[in-house]
Image: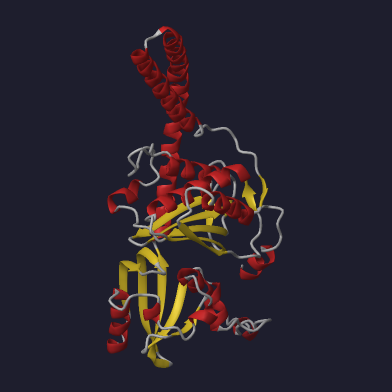
Amino acid sequence: MEAPARLLRPAVASTPAPDAASILSALATAVVVVDRQGRFRFANQAAEEFFALSATSLRGTRLAELVPEDSPLHQLIGQVLDGAVSVSDYDMAIESPRLSKRGITVHGAPVPEAPDCVALTLIDGSTPQKLEKQMGFRNAARSVTGMAAILAHEVKNPLSGIRGAAQLLESSASEQDRELTQLIQDEADRIRALVDRMESFSDRPIERGEVNIHQVLEHVRRLAQSGFARHVRFVEAYDPSLPAVWGNRDQLIQVVLNLVKNAAEAIPEAGGTIELATAYQHGVRLAVPGATTRLHLPLVVSVRDSGHGIPEQLRPNLFDPFVTTKRQGSGLGLALVAKIVGDHGGLVECDSVPGRTVFRLHLPMHPGTGVRLVQDDEVA
């Protein structure tokens, strides 16, 4: 028995199908079209975030202005244009003064309607690696938490007795022996200060509220310029429409202060620059242990410096406790940064080459802020 004709007819769409540009803009993968001269002809929203430029700014810009001409990305484009076939490359690194991305998967394909153009999809594979490292940083911080609890009980109490005994001896000691008793007190104070720093890794819950991150950045900048960063020129690149952060103001000040202090120490006395920047970035979500939903991390705070960079051998373990290149450093500063950002449900990452180091903080937005929520709905 034949089915009725009305069942064989395709259903008529009640609304017209979206155009190709709208579909591409909705994708989470960066898609661009580049012509034979290396100029951008199209970029979707994910590509704007990948290159940190708007589609309007990208359109007409030459790829060589963002990516060095000896990059394998240019070779891939040339292969597609010469052979009119699709070409893929995996685990590609893109390094330039503007970009530092590794583990990139690139697919290039010819555009039939435009023979002199290549469509590129760029998949940033570094994000899962950064998330995996972030979880490792949190585990390392938990180890320090346990160690701090032990030290507080087993070390701080005896230290108080040792210091008190040295003070008693000092009152009846000779001039030469007083130098030794003072040395004992100084060393006891130094060890106590180290234990106090480690106690900041405790698992106490943080008190959260609405935090204006620009006020935090300006507070740290003023502190730095009046003290340890007098030789540094600061540059601000703030997004004035940025919503409030859902966090703890004092702890965020500590995080930024640690990053700015490290940046200033990496810059020679002859001078250099530190750039403090904020931005809003769609699509970054993180599953936090114990949470029932994935946390949206749209707020990005960047601390960029023009210093000598981080030694390559330290980068994989940069946020681990006791990792430092400073002679008098304890190696707890960046571990504390990772711990505090992790307590906020956020993500911290670092890219470093000689002459440019940038730390990025991905932070949650205050739940009562509606400034950007409409834009999120529109994108979705």
Q: Hey, which residue is sitting farthest front in the picture?
A: 175
Question: Residue visible at 46% across and 29% down?
Answer: 193
Whether residue 248 is visible to the viewer of this picture, yes or no, is no
Q: Is residue 48 above or below residue 165?
A: below
Q: Quadrant of residue 203?
A: top right
Look at the image and name its color scheme.
Answer: secondary structure
Q: Quadrant of residue 68?
A: bottom left
Q: Please indicate whether residue 306 sits to the left or right of residue 258 in the image.
A: left
Q: Hey, which residue is sitting farthest top in the picture?
A: 172
Q: Position of residue 317 (x, y in %)?
A: 34, 46
Q: Please indicate whether residue 76 sits to the left or right of residue 173 in the image.
A: left
Whether residue 277 is visible to the viewer of this picture, yes or no, is yes
Nearer to the camera, 5 or 169: 169
Q: Is residue 374 above or below residue 110?
A: above
Q: Position of residue 57 (x, y in %)?
A: 51, 80
Q: Is residue 89 above or below residue 158?
A: below
Q: Position of residue 366 (x, y in %)?
A: 66, 52
Nearer to the camera, 227 or 362: 227
Q: Please indicate whether residue 209 sits to the left or right of residue 257 in the image.
A: right
Nearer to the camera, 99 or 285: 99
Q: Dividing the image into 4 quarters, which one contains the N terminus?
A: bottom right
Number of numbered labels in the structure image = 0
Q: Position of residue 99 (x, y in %)?
A: 40, 68
Q: Dividing the image into 4 quarters, which one contains the C terminus?
A: bottom right
Question: Residue visible at 66% across and 64% down?
Answer: 372
